[in-house]
Image (cartoon, helix red, strand yellow):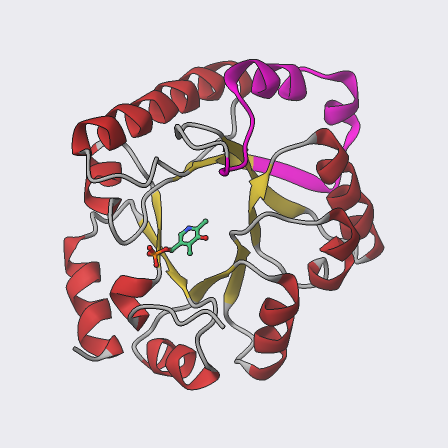
């Protein structure tokens, strides 16, 4: 199936309140251009350098989302244009995003990544670390970052019960911080293999790559 057909099929399945991030990491510009022609305006990348190159080449009405783990020393390269950083997992990183955003007179929207999976390889805060971060004195003083919600990745498994349980847990945490923190509107969870479950469990933003662009070829 073509990118066009894949996109159409996925969009048909998404409720109106769920935003689609087309994850274009490793894919060539032609693939992004095809998705753009179909009206896709939100793209997700996980490497800052690759995202910056694509941003330079593609039309300027695209929203670029950084979905990968962010190294602090590279924040400066995307601070001018990034729309949403999904994987924020420390106050140190937020401090750097705030500093770089200030230089461009921007307020950068961020999601806090929560660790919900079994694997240690996935990054993120646990519940206690999340609560500590959002209630810290310094966090309140950061004027050039805005926390819009939470992001999480489920365990890579065929066990749908487990995936559902992990998403459900993230949604409960989201609702809980939403009520004492306010202003949160994004719950980013769900990828090609599990986005249907994620939506049933309350996702408002799905990050889909291979189901749109085909399998990735890492070299
Ligand atoms: C690669 C990636 C995705 C998309 O994965 P697919 O399985 O190809 O849909 C989503 N989220 C994150 C954080 C990723 O790194």
Q: Position of residue 38 (x, y in %)?
A: 29, 77
Q: Position of residue 45 (x, y in %)?
A: 51, 62
Q: In the displayed image of the protein, which residue is found farthest to the bottom? A: 30
Compared to 14, does 62 lie above or below? below
Examine the structure image and report whether residue 146 is included in the region drawn in magenta: yes
Q: Nearer the viewer, residue 208 or 215?
A: 215
Q: Position of residue 75 (x, y in %)?
A: 73, 54
- Residue 81 placement, left or right of 181: right
Residue drawn at 72 percent across, 39 percent down: 93
Residue drawn at 15 percent across, 59 percent down: 12
Q: Position of residue 201 (x, y in %)?
A: 24, 31
Q: Nearer the viewer, residue 17 or 165?
A: 165
Magenta segment boundaries in residue numbering: 121-147
Q: In the displayed image of the protein, which residue is found farthest to the front? A: 219
Compared to 151, does 99 lie above or below? below
Q: Nearer the viewer, residue 213 or 179?
A: 213
């Amino acid at each position: 199936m073509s990118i066009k057909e894949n996109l159409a099929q996925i969009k048909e399945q998404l409720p109106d309140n769920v935003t689609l991030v087309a994850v274009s990491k490793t894919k060539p510009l032609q693939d992004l251009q095809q998705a753009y022609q179909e009206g896709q305006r939100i793209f997700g990348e996980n490497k800052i350098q690759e995202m910056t190159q694509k941003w330079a080449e593609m039309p300027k009405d695209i929203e670029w989302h950084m979905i990968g783990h962010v190294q602090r020393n590279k924040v400066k390269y995307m601070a001018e244009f990034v729309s949403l950083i999904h994987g924020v997992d420390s106050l140190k990183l937020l401090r750097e995003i705030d500093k770089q955003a200030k230089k461009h007179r921007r307020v950068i929207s961020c999601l806090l990544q929560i660790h919900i999976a079994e694997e240690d390889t996935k990054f993120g805060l646990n519940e206690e670390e999340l609560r500590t971060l959002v209630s810290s004195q310094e966090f309140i003083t950061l004027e050039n970052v805005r926390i819009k919600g939470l992001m999480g990745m489920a365990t890579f498994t065929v066990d749908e019960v487990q995936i559902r349980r992990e998403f459900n847990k993230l949604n409960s945490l989201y609702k809980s911080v939403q009520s004492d923190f306010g202003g949160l509107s994004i719950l980013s969870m769900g990828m090609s293999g599990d986005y249907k479950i994620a939506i049933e469990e309350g996702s408002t933003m799905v990050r889909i790559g291979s189901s749109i662009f085909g399998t990735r070829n890492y070299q």
